[in-house]
Image (cartoon, grey):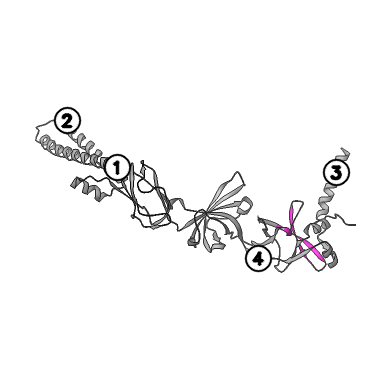
Amino acid sequence: MKATFLCLLAVLCIHQAAFAVDELTLSANQKQTLGIITAALPPKQQGELSGMPAQVVIPGNQLFTISTPLAAMVEQTLVGVGDAVSKGQILATLQSPALAEAQRGLLQASTQSQLAKDNLARDEKLWQDGIISESRYRATQSQYREASAALAERKQMLKLSGMSGNAISQLQSGSNLNSLLSVTSPIDGVILEKNASAGQRLDAAVSLFKVAKLDPLALEIQAPLASTKGLKVGAAVSVPAYGATGKLTAIGRSLSGGNQTILLRALIHNGTESLRPGQFVEASIDTNAENSTQWSVPNSALARIGGKTLVFVETAKGFRNEAVSVLHEGAQSSLVSGKFNGDEKIAVQGVSALKAQMMGIGAE
């Protein structure tokens, strides 16, 4: 027990000694001997998280997959990957016996509906004249409703197959069956994928094309939890390397299991022509925090002692330690906040020697 008490007492003394020295007195020769190199404090940044890893993605409501509505053979493809297309433009033509069968079903349903309509008109007059019973009239009404529903179903099937309302009306009036099916673009956009070629036979619901609108684009940003404090939806977001700008649209509520980061989503409206879906970039986010002057310093300038992070500022006699808060830690530099005037010089090499001197390690 006595040995344990002495160990705890020693640790406590070291912890107290770690901050007992606020300023170190060092001569120029001592600085040189310890390998201490200083540099001017980098220019301040006003409330910005920079260097955040992000990926360019397409907003979900701007991406469409165009599939074969019926089993068919590809007769001709008219566009390729990367082509710009307009809404309603024909992308491919297909030959589909199933389409002709669906058209024949429509004609049959149309004939049955017209017959049921005529029967209803006749029985309604006979019922009003008291020639037939009300039950027969109600039965004729029911048959007409069933025939009308069957006709509407056949029309809807043809619309889902790609036929327009005008084409369906012409089919009903002319009774000319056609197995040619045209696949059109639902939006103004760009072809991202093409999965079929002429002569290929395809089943129903097989993907033919992927078309997307590429303005605006979205960013999925991976941010450490500590960096998201104070972030708000609507904050300005930029991709400095490509001159793209936008707004933060969503802040995730859960952490990813692998790297313990939060997913942020942003919408980029300006400079989208320089970005490509799937591209990895570095994004900057405006935090808009009050009194949030921040400084980007090299990681080599940071010293961690007793749970605090310090920077050594050069003085006339030597160095003083200045406590800082790390807002975002990168691979080479970190974003910190602290009480600086902006004209200081800080130690960027030999920090471990200053840390040892401040803790009394190696002193006489």
Q: Earlier in the sequence, mark 3 or mark 1?
A: 3
Q: Quadrant of residue 42?
A: bottom right
Q: Which residue is disc 4 drawn over?
A: 44
Q: CA distance from mark 2 to mark 4?
A: 89 Å
Number of the front mark, 2 or 3? 3
Q: CA distance from mark 2 to mark 3?
A: 103 Å
Side of 259 where 174 appears, left or right = left
Q: Which residue is disc 1 drawn over?
A: 157
Tell me the SS state at disc 4. Answer: strand
How far from the left and from the top, in percent, is residue 302?
A: 73, 57
For the C terminus, the image quarter is bottom right
Tell me the residue at 51%/53% (across/down): 278
Tell me the SS state at disc 2. Answer: helix
Tell me the SS state at disc 1. Answer: helix
Q: Which residue is disc 2 drawn over?
A: 135
Q: Amino acid at mark 3?
A: Cys
Q: Which residue is disc 3 drawn over?
A: 7
Q: State the extent of the magenta-drawn residues as a range.
A: 300-324
